[in-house]
Image (tube, rainbow, N blue to C red):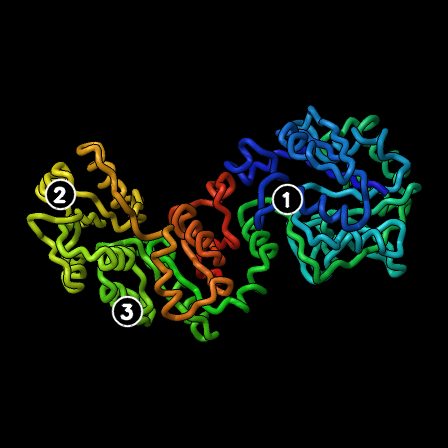
Amino acid sequence: MIGVILAAGVGSRLRPMTNNKPKCLVTTAGKPILQYQIDAYKEAGIDELIIIVGYEGGAIREYCKHIKDIKIQIIENRDYEITNNMYSLHLAKELAAGKSFILNNADLSIDSSIVKRLLEHEAENAIAVDRSLFNEESMKVTVRDSGTISNISKKILEHESYACSIDFYKFSKEASTIFFNEINRIIEEEKNLKDWTEVAMQRLFQAEKLDFWACDISGLDWVEVDNYDDLALSDRKFSKLDDKLKDIESILFDLDGTVYVGNQVITGASQAIAMLQAKGKNIYFLSNNSSKSKLDYVERLKNIGIECSASQIVLSTDGLISHLAHERVDNIHVLGTNSLKKTLLDEGFQIDSAKPEYVVVGYDTELSYQKLITACKYINEGTDILATHCDVFCPSEHGPIPDIGATLEMIRLTTGKSPKKIFGKPASEMVEPLIKAFKLDPNKTLIVGDRLHTDILMSKNLSCYGMLVLSGESTRDQLENSDIKPDFVLNSIADL
C-alpha cells in the first residue's frame, strides 16, 4: 500500500499567502498542511508516498528532501494551469496503476489517525466520509441498500446525501487498474484534461463497475482548506484551543487592537470576556499605552460593558515605576501626557527637575514642539532616556497613527541617543509583578493580543500560552512568515 497526494493546485483563495508557496505548505496550528498528511501516513505504517506537484512545486521538493523516514517520489505536472487533479493522477499511472494505494488531495488538515482508520476498514475499497455534517463545498456520497456507494458529487442535496467525503480514497489492486483505465479513457480518448478524479469515480460507481464502501471517520478532526475561513477553523481545531481553554485559569488581554481599535469596540468583546469571567477565569488587561492612567482604563472599560478594578490593569508605566524606585531615582523630566505626569507625581517623583537623572518618554498624545525642544535639551546635555514602551504606531479606527516608537526615532535622529531601557511588552518584567502578586501559574495563563512582536513574544518570554487575534495590527499573512508563532489564532476575541 502506497500513498498518492495530489498537490499541483494554485490555492488562489489563500493569496497573498500562496503568492510564493503552494497551499499545502501554508501552516495551520504551527504545521504545514502537507505535514498533517505525511504524519497520518506514517502512523498508518505506509512508507512510500507519491506527490504530484505543480504550482511552486520546487518548494514541495525542498520541503520533502530532508524527510528520511518515508520514501517520497515527486512527479511534476507542468501543465497545472490548464489541467485538473485527474490529469495529475494520470501522470502517476506508471507508479500507481495496478497497485493498492490511498489517494488524497493535499489541501486537508487531518487527524493523524484518519489514514490508519481507512486502512483498517474491512472493505478493500473505501472512501473516508464524515456522517456528522453536511458541507456544501465538499464532495458528498450516496449509497445503495447494499451499502455500496452509488454516486459521488458536490451537487448531491442534503436529503440525498449519506455523508461528506473528506477526499481520502482507498483502492485495491483490482480497483486501481479499473480506475486508471477510466482515467486513461477520459484523458487520452476524450481529451478532457480539466476534470476532478471524482468524475472518473462517479462514472464507475453509477455503472456499478466499482464497489466502494463508506468508512465513517466522524469524531476525528479534518478541515479542507480552501479559504481564510477554512484556515481559521483549522487553526482552532488543530491547536486544540477549546480543550486547552478549559485548563487555563488566567487570561491577560491586550486592549487596543484586541478589545477595541481606537474608539471602535470589537463586536462581541464584552460578551466574550463576561463569558470567561462567568467560567471562573481570572481576567486582567495589558496596555503599552502610557498616555492614560489605570483609572482612565477602568472607566473606559466600564463604558463598554466590562467591569474591572485598577488592580486588573497592567501598564507599561508599572515596569518604569518599579525600575525608578529600585534605582532610587527622584528627579526626572517627563515627555508625556498630563495623565502620565500625574501618575509619576503621585508615586513621589519630581517630574520637572532642572537636573533630571532621566528623560522619561511616554506615548504623548499632547505632544508639542516646545516639549520636544526641552526634552532634547536635557538629552543633548547627557541625560539618559527611559521609554515606557517601543510601539512605533498605535492602531486606530483611522488606521495606524504615530506612537512612542516614532517619537523615539525622531529623537534618535536629532540627538543620536536611544533609550537606555524600554519597558512594556514584550518585556516579561511588565507582568512579573502581577504574576507574583496573584500567584499566577504561567502554564495556566493565556496572553491575548493583536501584535506578534509584543503580545505573542511576551507570552513566549513568560512561558505562557499566546493567542493572536487578527482584529488589530498583525494579519494571518504576516503570521505565515513570522518566526514568532502563537499557540492559538482567532479572528477576534468574540470567537471565544
According to the image, label 2 marks what residue? 375
Q: Is residue 237 left or right of residue 111?
A: left
Along the viewing direction, whichever of 329 and 43 lies nearer the viewer: 329
Distance from label 2 to label 1 (Cα)?
A: 52 Å
Distance from label 3 to label 1 (Cα)?
A: 44 Å
Whether tag 3 and tag 1 are in contact, CB under 8 A, the answer is no
**Residue 469 in view, yes or no:** no
Q: Label 1: how many residues lie within 10 Å, few (<14), some (14-19) or many (20+)?
A: many
Q: Name the residue at 55% across, 40% down.
A: 13
What's under tag 3, amino acid-wise?
Ala
Along the viewing direction, whichever of 346 and 247 lies nearer the viewer: 346
Residue closest to the far left: 354
According to the image, label 1 marks what residue? 33
Residue 237 in which image quadrant: bottom right
Give coordinates of residue 120: x percent, y percent: 85, 55
**Residue 248 in view, yes or no:** yes
Along the viewing direction, whichever of 311 and 385 lies nearer the viewer: 385
Residue 8 in which image quadrant: top right
Q: Name the residue at 25% across, 37% down.
A: 409
What's under tag 2, amino acid-wise?
Ala
Picture layout, residue 56 above or below residue 306: above
What's under tag 1, amino acid-wise?
Ile
Q: Label 3: how many residues lie within 10 Å, few (<14), some (14-19) or many (20+)?
A: some
Q: Is residue 247 left or right of residue 120?
A: left
According to the image, label 3 marks what residue? 310
Give coordinates of residue 50: x percent, y percent: 77, 35
Whether tag 2 and tag 3 are in contact, CB under 8 A, the answer is no
Q: Name the residue at 70% across, 62% down.
A: 219
